[in-house]
Every structure is written in C-alpha cells, then in structure tokens.
Amino acid sequence: MIISKAHRTKAIGIFDSGIGGLTVVAEIIKQLPNENVIYFGDTGRYPYGPRSREIIRKFSKQNVNFLLEKGVKFIIIACNTASAFALEYVRKMYTVPMIGVVKPGSEAAARLTGNGRIGVIGTEGTIVSSSYQKELKKLNGSLKISAKPCPLFVSLAEEGYIDKPAARLIARDYLSEIKQKKIDTLVLGCTHYPLLKKVIGNVMGGKVTLVDSAEQTASAVKDTLTRLELDNPSKKTGEKRFYVSDSPEKFKRLGERFLGKRIGKVNLIDINAY
Ligand code: DGL
C-alpha cells in the first residue's frame, strides 16, 4: 500500500496521565525532530497509577478518541500504567497503529541483561498488572524478575526533589529489596523515573544498567514509522501542540522540567466530551 505524503505529514498523537509523558516527547524530539506531535496530558484525572484497570481503559479510550479527532497518524501511549492496562484493549478497537512503553522497555532489558536478573519499578497499577513481568517472560522464559512499586518517586519528580537527601532516603528504602536480588538491569517503568536516574543509579550502583522506557519507545517508534512508511518525509522541524484536561498553566510550568524545553501555548479541553 502506498501511503500518501499528506498522511505521512500528519502528527503523532501521544497521551499520558499528565506531564510525565513529556519524557517521551523529549526523546521523540531528539530521535525524530521532523515529526509533528499532538500531546494530550490528562491532568484533570491524574494520577493513573493508583486506579483500576476498568477506569484506565475508559480514560484511554476517550484519550484515543480525542487524538483521532485531531487527525493523528499514529498513537503512543506514553503512560506506563495506561500501556499496562489498556494498550491491547484500545488497539483492538481502532485501526490507527499504536505503541505503548512496556514492550520497548522490556525488549531493551532482555537484550541488555548479562546475568538474566532484571528489576522493574513502576506505579502500583503497572506492577500489579504484571505487564512488564509477562512481556519479559515472553521474550525469555528463564529471566528472573523482581518488581517493586515506587509510588513516591512520582511526587518527588513533580516537586523537583530529584537530588535531595529525602529522595536518596526514599530510593534506598524502595530499592533495597530488589538490590538484594543481584539484578544487573533495572527498568524505569514509569514516565517520571527518568528524572530520578541519578539518585536511582547511585543507590543501585554502577554495575546496574538503567533502562529508560521513554528512550526505548522513541527508538521503537522510529523503526515502526519507517516500516509502515508513515515517517514524515519533511526535513523541517516538526510542530508540537499541547492539550490538557485541567490547569494549563501548571502543566506549562512543571512540564518544562520534564521536556527540558520551553512549552508554548497549552490548550484546555473537555475530555469527558469524547
Ligand atoms: N504516567 C504514569 C505512569 O507512567 C505516572 C503518573 C501517574 O500515576 O499518573 O505510570
């Protein structure tokens, strides 16, 4: 099938529970600078981490409907909790190609481990769903996986407590259990955790490789767009547009730390209309 140039220049749609998915946008900007991006942060219904599968599925469906109305060519579920609970569910309902963050992160971890012992950290929902654990076992049944929810990391990242004694204390406490399991690879299975890479790395020690799901997802998106002939042929820097379901000003202020760049206009939408 020949994909028209007009279709290929359409935006990639990305959604997350709030600002965290901007770590994925930052990687897209790095690896696919010419792609247009439409980002939706569900700030009005944040956080997703402690919620049930049913509600995350309902929210994800509405978020996809919104992005489709904007005419996107491809969808990235940047939120680990939504990827874990809802990717397969929404994928079955639509024809637009979609990707989550769990598979790319798992593939990288399975590739990088030397001793076959992998740790996974994420929100309560992501860990309870066992999505990373299942994906890793699918890739290699002999892997030994230790998983641990680290919910406070989300608040630490949002509050900018990324290199303070409190962050080190919490990280030491959260990670002590999986550290004892002698893992050599740790999956940062939450949008916010890449911001805490330094403190997590210090606690785990230099021999443990940290897998950033955001980085791995952007590289999987690059491969998938090329394979599907959906990559934007334009050489111009892509346009980035931001939408939220509450508090655009707060999104802009906190989001710039996650994106590492200035954010222009942020548009407020009523997600319950979708
Ligand atoms: N975006 C969520 C995730 O990656 C973290 C924040 C939340 O709980 O909504 O799982």
Image (spheres, rainbow, N blue to C red):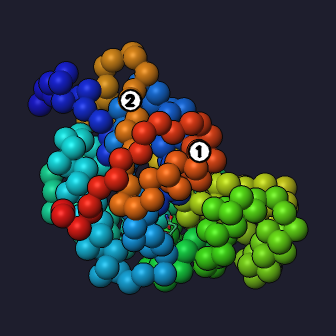
Residue at left 19%, top 41%? Answer: 71
The image quadrant of residue 223 is: top left
Residue at left 23%, top 67%? Answer: 272
Q: CA distance from mark 2 to mark 1?
A: 16 Å
**Identity of the amino acid at label 1?**
Glu
Farthest residue, direction right? 165
**Identity of the amino acid at label 2?**
Glu
Q: Secondary structure at mark 2?
A: loop
Of 135 and 120, which appears nearest the observer? 120
Q: Position of residue 112 (x, y in %)?
A: 64, 53
Image quadrant in which the C terminus is located? bottom left
Q: Residues within 10 Å of mark 1 (few under 14, many from 20)?
A: some
Q: Which residue is mark 2?
A: 239
Q: Which mark is residue 183?
A: none
Of 27 and 264, which appears nearest the observer? 264
Q: Please indicate, yes or no, whether residue 67 appears anywhere in the rendered image.
A: yes
Farthest residue, direction left? 1
Q: Is mark 1 within 8 Å of ligand 1?
A: no
Q: Which residue is mark 1?
A: 256
Image quadrant in which the N terminus is located? top left
